[in-house]
Image: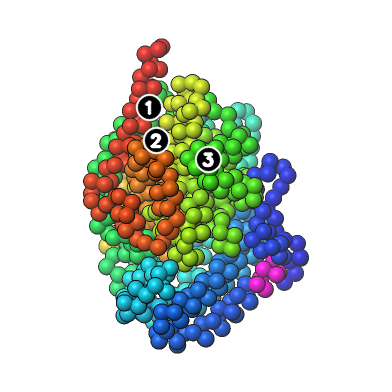
C-alpha cells in the first residue's frame, strides 16, 4: 500500500493546541496497520456470523445474552477503527492518506453492514415472535434494543435484498453525499476584512454569517449563497437523488410514510412529532416578536435575511480567546456538578477536541463516541466569538451525556435517539448563559448573552423547524411526480420559511438566500431522513427541564444525571414519563416556550432600560 509507517496526528503547534490527536484511537498504528486491523475485524465478523446465524432462533435467553455480548465487543472494535478513518477525513479531506483511510473505512463499513443486517433481522424475528423471551432477566440490559429490532421487522426485506441495498447505497447515495461534502470543503474564498485580504475555507466563511459587523455578514452571506447558487446543479442533483432513493425504498419496504424510518430510528410516534410541529407553527409569533426586538437593538426597521442569526450587538463586549473559552466551558458545567466539569476538562486535556480552522476541514460541529475509552471526540471551528463558545459548550454537553450513557448502558443501548441526545448539549448552553450573565460587567454584555441564547433557541426550534417543513414538502413533491431541481427546491424552501417568519424578515435584501437549503448537510445524509425535528424536540424539552431545575435546585442534579445515563434503554416517552413529563400531551410542548418567554422578558427590560437611559 506504500503509505508509510507514521501514525496520522492532526496536531500542530501553530494552532494553540486547538487540534485533536486521533492516533490514540488506534494506539499509534500506521495507516497500513489500520487497514490490516479493519480487514481482520471483517474476517472475525464473517466467522462470527457463520458460527451463529443458524442458531439464533433456537437460543435460550442466556445463550442469546452471550451471543449479543460477543457481538457487541466486535461491533465496538470495528466502530472505533471506522471512527479513526472518518475523523481523519473530516479533519482534512484534502490529505491523500486521509482520503485513503476514508475509502478503506467506507468499504469495511459496507462489508460489516452486510454481515450485521441478517443478524439483526434474525434477532428482530426472535424478539417479535417470542416477546416473553425479552422478560427474562438475562436480557434486561438489551431488552429495549431488541424491542426496536422487532419494530423494524415488518419492513425488513430478505437477507439477499438487504445485502444488495447496502452495496447500492455505498456506490450510489453515499457517493453523492461524499461528492457534495468534499466539493464544499475544498472551496476557498477570497475576502477582504478591515482592509486585509484573506483566503478562507468554506467553514470560516460560513461562520462570518453571524459576524457582528453587518457589512461583513452581508458579504459572507452573499458569497456563500452565490457559491451554492453557482453549484446549484450539484446540490440539487444530490438532494433529488438521495431523497428519491429514500422515497423508493420506503415504498419497497411497505412503510406507511417517508417519515416512518425516522420514527423507528428515533423511537417516537408520528402523533407526538406532528403535535410538536403544530406547536412550532402555532407559537411562531414568539420568534417574530424576538426578531422585531432584535431589529430594534440593531437599529433596523426590518431585519434582512442575513441579520436573522446575527448577534444582538454590533460590537461584541466579550473577549473569548481559546484558553479563556476552555475555562469558561469547564466552569459552566462545574457550576452545576463538579463531576460534569471534570468530564469536560478531560475532553480538552485528552486532546479530543478539534477547534482549529483549516482548509479541507468539514464544516459544522459534531460530537461522536469512542467506545473503547467510553468517551467522545468533538469537532468544531473556534474563532473567538460568543456564538463559537456556545457551540463549544453544546458539543461538550454531548460528550457529557455520552459519558454517562456509555458507562451505564451497553454499547448497543447507548444511544437515546436524536430527540433525547441533545439534552446534555442544550442544557449546557443554559448553564453557560447563567455563567456569562453572572460575570457580565455591563448591560450590553447581558443583552449580548441573552440575545445569543434566545437566537439559538428560536433558531433551533423555528428556523430548524423550517427544515422539517421543507423536507416534508420535498417528499410530497416527489410523491406527486415533480422534479426537484434547484429552482423547485428554492420555491419549496421559501414556502416553508414563510410559514414561520411570515413577513417579519426582508429576504429579498439577501442575495441568493433562497439557496439556503443547499448549505444544510442534514438533507444529504443517506438513510437518515427527517433528522431536523429532533433538534426542535430537544430544545423544547431542555427548556422545560431547565424550568424544573430552577424550581428543584440541587435535588434536580442527580435526577438529571440519571436521565442522561438512560441512553437507549427506554423509549423517549417512557424515560420522560418516569421523569414526570408526558410528551403525548400537546400542552407539554408549550412549557419550553414559556421558559423562553421569561428570558425574552428579561431581554425586553434590558433593551427598554437602554433607551430610557439615553
Identify residue for label 2.
454
Within-10-Å neighbours for mark 1: few <14, some 14–19, many 20+: many
Instruction: Answer whether residue 286 is visible to the viewer in this image.
Output: yes
Residue stretch rendered in magenta on the structure: 31-37
Secondary structure, mark 3, is helix
Magenta part mainly helix, strand or loop?
A: helix
Which of the 4 image quarters holds residue 85?
bottom right
Q: Earlier in the sequence, mark 2 or mark 1?
A: 2
| Way the structure is coloured | rainbow
Magenta-span inclusion, residue 566: no
Return the mark for residue 48. none
Q: For residue 43, which quarter of the picture?
A: bottom right
- Identify the image quadrant of residue 141: bottom left
Determine if residue 482 is in view: no
Q: Which residue is mark 1?
A: 603
Image spot of residue 116 (x, y percent): 48, 76
Indicate which disc, 3 or 2, sits on the residue closer to the N terminus.
Answer: 3
Amino acid at each position: 500500500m506504500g503509505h508509510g509507517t507514521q501514525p496520522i496526528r492532526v496536531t500542530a503547534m501553530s494552532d494553540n493546541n486547538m487540534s485533536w490527536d486521533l492516533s490514540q484511537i488506534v494506539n499509534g498504528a500506521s495507516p497500513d496497520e489500520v487497514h490490516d486491523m479493519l480487514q481482520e475485524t471483517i474476517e472475525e465478523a464473517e466467522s462470527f456470523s457463520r458460527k451463529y446465524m443458524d442458531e439464533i432462533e433456537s437460543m435460550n435467553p442466556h445463550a442469546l445474552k452471550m451471543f449479543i455480548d460477543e457481538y457487541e465487543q466486535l461491533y465496538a472494535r470495528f466502530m472505533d477503527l471506522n471512527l479513526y478513518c472518518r475523523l481523519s477525513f473530516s479533519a482534512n479531506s484534502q490529505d491523500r492518506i486521509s482520503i485513503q483511510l476514508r475509502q478503506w473505512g467506507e468499504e469495511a463499513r459496507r462489508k460489516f453492514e452486510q454481515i450485521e443486517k441478517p443478524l439483526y433481522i434474525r434477532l428482530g424475528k426472535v424478539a417479535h415472535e417470542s416477546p416473553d423471551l425479552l422478560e427474562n432477566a438475562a436480557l434486561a440490559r438489551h431488552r429495549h434494543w431488541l424491542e426496536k429490532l422487532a419494530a423494524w421487522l415488518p419492513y425488513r426485506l430478505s437477507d439477499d435484498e438487504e445485502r444488495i441495498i447496502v452495496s447500492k447505497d455505498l456506490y450510489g447515495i453515499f457517493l453523492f453525499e461524499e461528492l457534495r461534502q468534499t466539493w464544499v470543503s475544498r472551496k476557498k474564498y477570497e475576502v477582504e476584512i478591515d482592509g486585509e485580504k484573506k483566503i478562507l475555507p468554506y467553514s470560516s466563511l460560513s461562520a462570518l454569517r453571524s459576524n457582528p459587523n453587518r457589512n461583513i455578514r452581508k458579504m459572507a452571506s452573499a458569497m456563500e449563497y452565490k457559491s451554492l447558487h453557482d453549484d446549484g446543479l450539484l446540490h440539487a442533483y444530490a438532494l433529488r437523488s438521495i431523497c428519491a432513493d429514500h422515497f423508493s425504498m420506503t415504498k419497497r419496504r411497505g412503510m406507511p410514510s417517508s417519515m416512518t424510518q425516522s420514527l423507528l430510528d428515533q423511537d417516537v410516534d408520528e402523533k407526538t412529532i406532528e403535535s410538536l410541529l403544530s406547536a412550532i407553527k402555532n407559537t411562531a409569533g414568539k420568534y417574530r416578536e424576538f426578531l422585531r426586538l432584535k431589529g430594534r437593538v440593531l437599529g433596523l426597521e426590518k431585519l434582512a435575511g442575513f441579520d436573522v442569526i446575527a448577534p444582538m450587538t454590533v460590537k461584541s463586549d466579550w473577549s473569548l480567546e481559546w484558553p479563556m473559552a476552555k475555562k469558561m466551558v469547564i466552569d459552566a458545567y462545574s457550576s452545576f456538578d463538579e463531576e460534569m466539569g471534570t468530564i469536560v476538562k478531560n475532553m480538552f486535556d485528552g486532546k479530543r477536541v478539534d477547534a482549529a480552522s483549516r482548509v479541507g476541514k468539514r464544516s459544522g460541529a459534531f460530537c461522536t463516541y469512542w467506545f473503547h475509552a467510553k468517551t467522545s471526540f468533538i469537532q468544531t471551528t473556534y474563532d473567538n466569538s460568543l456564538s463559537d463558545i456556545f457551540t463549544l459548550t453544546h458539543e461538550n454537553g454531548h460528550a457529557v451525556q455520552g459519558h454517562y450513557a456509555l458507562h451505564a448502558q451497553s454499547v448497543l443501548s447507548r444511544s437515546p435517539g436524536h430527540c433525547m441526545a441533545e439534552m446534555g448539549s442544550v442544557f449546557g448552553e443554559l448553564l453557560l448563559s447563567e455563567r456569562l450573565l453572572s460575570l457580565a460587567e455591563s448591560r450590553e454584555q447581558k443583552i449580548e448573552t441573552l440575545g445569543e441564547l434566545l437566537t439559538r433557541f428560536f433558531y433551533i426550534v423555528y428556523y430548524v423547524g423550517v427544515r422539517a417543513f421543507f423536507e416534508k414538502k420535498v417528499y410530497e413533491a416527489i410523491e406527486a411526480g415533480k422534479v426537484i431541481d434547484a429552482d423547485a427546491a428554492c420555491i419549496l424552501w421559501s414556502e416553508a420559511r414563510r410559514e414561520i417568519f411570515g413577513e417579519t424578515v426582508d429576504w429579498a435584501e439577501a442575495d441568493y438566500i433562497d439557496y439556503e437549503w443547499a448549505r444544510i448537510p442534514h438533507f444529504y445524509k443517506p438513510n437518515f431522513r427527517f433528522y431536523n425535528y429532533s433538534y426542535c424536540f430537544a430544545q423544547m424539552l431542555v427548556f422545560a427541564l431547565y424550568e424544573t431545575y430552577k424550581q428543584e435546585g440541587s435535588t434536580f442534579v442527580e435526577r438529571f444525571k440519571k436521565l442522561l445515563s438512560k441512553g437507549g434503554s427506554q423509549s423517549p416517552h417512557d424515560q420522560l414519563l418516569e421523569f414526570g413529563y408526558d410528551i403525548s400531551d400537546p400542552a407539554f410542548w408549550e412549557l419550553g416556550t414559556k421558559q423562553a418567554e421569561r428570558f425574552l422578558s428579561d431581554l425586553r427590560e434590558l433593551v427598554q432600560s437602554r433607551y430610557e437611559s439615553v
